[in-house]
Image: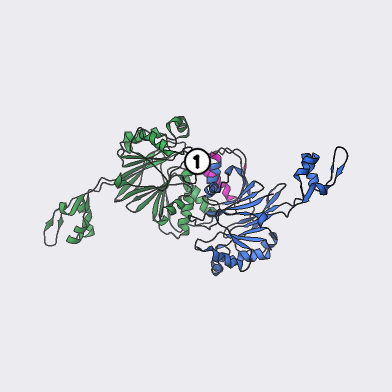
Chain colours: A blue, B green
Amino acid sequence: MSFKLTILGSNSAIPTVKKHPTAQLLNADERFFLIDCGEGTQIQLLKNKIKVHKINHIFISHLHGDHYFGLIGLINTMHLLGRTKELNLYAHQPLKEIIDLQFQASNTELKFPLFFHPIPTDKEKILFEDEQIVISSLMLKHSIDSSGFLFREKKSTKNILKEKIETYGITVEKIPEIKKGADFKLKDGRIIPNDELTVVAKTPHSYAFCSDTTYVATNAEKIKGVTLLYHETTFMQDLKDKAIQTGHSTTIDAATLAKQANVKQLLIGHFSSRYNNLNIVLNEAKSIFENTILATDGATFDFDLI
Amino acid sequence: MSFKLTILGSNSAIPTVKKHPTAQLLNADERFFLIDCGEGTQIQLLKNKIKVHKINHIFISHLHGDHYFGLIGLINTMHLLGRTKELNLYAHQPLKEIIDLQFQASNTELKFPLFFHPIPTDKEKILFEDEQIVISSLMLKHSIDSSGFLFREKKSTKNILKEKIETYGITVEKIPEIKKGADFKLKDGRIIPNDELTVVAKTPHSYAFCSDTTYVATNAEKIKGVTLLYHETTFMQDLKDKAIQTGHSTTIDAATLAKQANVKQLLIGHFSSRYNNLNIVLNEAKSIFENTILATDGATFDFDLI
């Protein structure tokens, strides 16, 4: 299963011409999950050649504008483009009224079902689950309610070899049990052992998205060993006081969490507009956790290569 | 007085990478009036090197998203940049609740006074007036309440010659009456005739902004002889039925109004995304009103040159 993350916006609250506010797209085997949706996200999707009709699930971490002001425009565009299939929105409760009020003001009746799934603010919750992936909320600590998101591919026991399906005429119904370890019985009675039909699946990918938050030590256990951790890094360590005061993290906060959680790689973003040279920001994080990279608008990360 | 219009966005409802939704900036003698504010307007202001703190008055024509989804982000950025001076917002009543609700959700208390001036939907109204300009609403006809805006420089009777102020020691208090035609009496009793102190002022500029609307014949009288008329031109004439159905105008509608109102120049915009070659759109409008030009993102029009 392919697992790729595209950064649509990497800046903090005030956008610049080159750095947009937070938005990311996770492509999990051609299912597209949009995470946060700052102003201009629909244009960033266009620039990155991602078709909006492919997005069926949108996750909004919190209701500061740089994380959701682009949402209403994106939903409106989906409507104008004639979307009919359902859209699922996971966010804190007040967003529902904000959206409803704006469509009411424009006398718009959406042509597709928009399902609003409120994220609880007092506990973690599984927000979405299917046969391949489970997505949960994480508790963050910011100046207003803020949630992170944890995407975990399910452990697929075994992968079936495509050529064997043809060779032995394996029907679709038989595939799930073979993936779980069953042998296959041919019409003539011969038994094909499971080992001949399958390969051991690769390690499942996982992605933790920690949006606006101070350092939350208890999250280390919850995101333990994830393939990639995105963690906001609004400030460098010399502005630690400002970070605490505004409910944000520093480079050292993010890198410390990455180290404690023993993640494979740390991705930092949500940079204050004061930083022109992000390499200095990066190096400070690397001083604690070496395998750290920068989120930059338009960059795509393939989890198979992490 | 300099009078210049910059197009920040010229497209209709669905934005493209190169054409943003409606937003314009009128610079009337270094006073900056923002007209509509589609998503991404703050980035367009940055790209066009217009400082957001210079804007003190914002006019929103109607509450379809492509005309105001960028407003909340712009106001939020003004707040984050530490603005303290007042901002005046002229729009239809429901916008107030939409803004209030979003700042409430983010627990934001604006650091500056935001004065909301509701635009009446049943009559025209003077929205702003000072010694140099008067700005009124126009009644439009769209699928929801929609207003145009008419900016008229006041007829300054005469302009005083700056060098004469110094030569004769003319005090600030005396200037208004000299501009109205009075002579100036020196301390030694000599009278300096008005003709020596002033020049005849140039024709005052005027700008009519007709946002989303069908053709409204009665507006021809109201915008009679304006220097520049912006009129939406969502469709070409072959889609006249669709224009009527959606409350929009065609090239021919816009050009007909320009001709009836005897304006100096017509500026067309708000193009449907279906038109890749806007020259064809332009030519159709020109067939009725020759002095027609296209609104394109980033273009600036100097009223002294019209």
Secondary structure beneath label 1: loop
* Residue A163 visible within the image: yes
| Range shown magenta | A79-104
Q: Is residue A60 left or right of residue B197?
A: right
Please state which of residues A35 and B192 is positioned toward the viewer in this rendering: A35
Q: Is residue B150 magenta?
A: no
- The image position of residue B224, as x and y in percent, is 31, 37
Instruction: Please name the amino acid that badge 1 sits on.
Output: Ser
Q: Residue placed farthest to the right in the image?
A: A189
Kindly identify which chain the residue marked by label 1 belongs to: A
For label 1, the residue is A106
Up the image or down, A157 lies above or below A280; here it is: above
Q: Is residue A167 left or right of residue A98?
A: right
Up the image or down, B68 lies above or below B248; here it is: below
- The image position of residue B78, as x and y in percent, is 45, 56
Please state which of residues B24 and B94 is positioned toward the viewer in this rendering: B24
- The image position of residue A265, as x and y in percent, is 65, 61
Up the image or down, A178 lies above or below A251; here it is: above
User: What residue do we see at 52% from left, 41% from top?
Assistant: A104
Which quadrant would the C terminus of chain A be assigned to in this image? bottom right
Q: How many marks?
A: 1
Up the image or down, B62 lies above or below A14; here it is: above
Q: Is residue A85 magenta?
A: yes
User: What residue do we see at 48% from left, 37% from top?
Assistant: B274
Badge 1 crowding class, 10 Å Cα cut-off, few under 14, some 14 to 19, many 20 or more, is some
Q: Is residue B151 left or right of residue A274?
A: left
- The image position of residue B53, as x and y in percent, is 41, 57
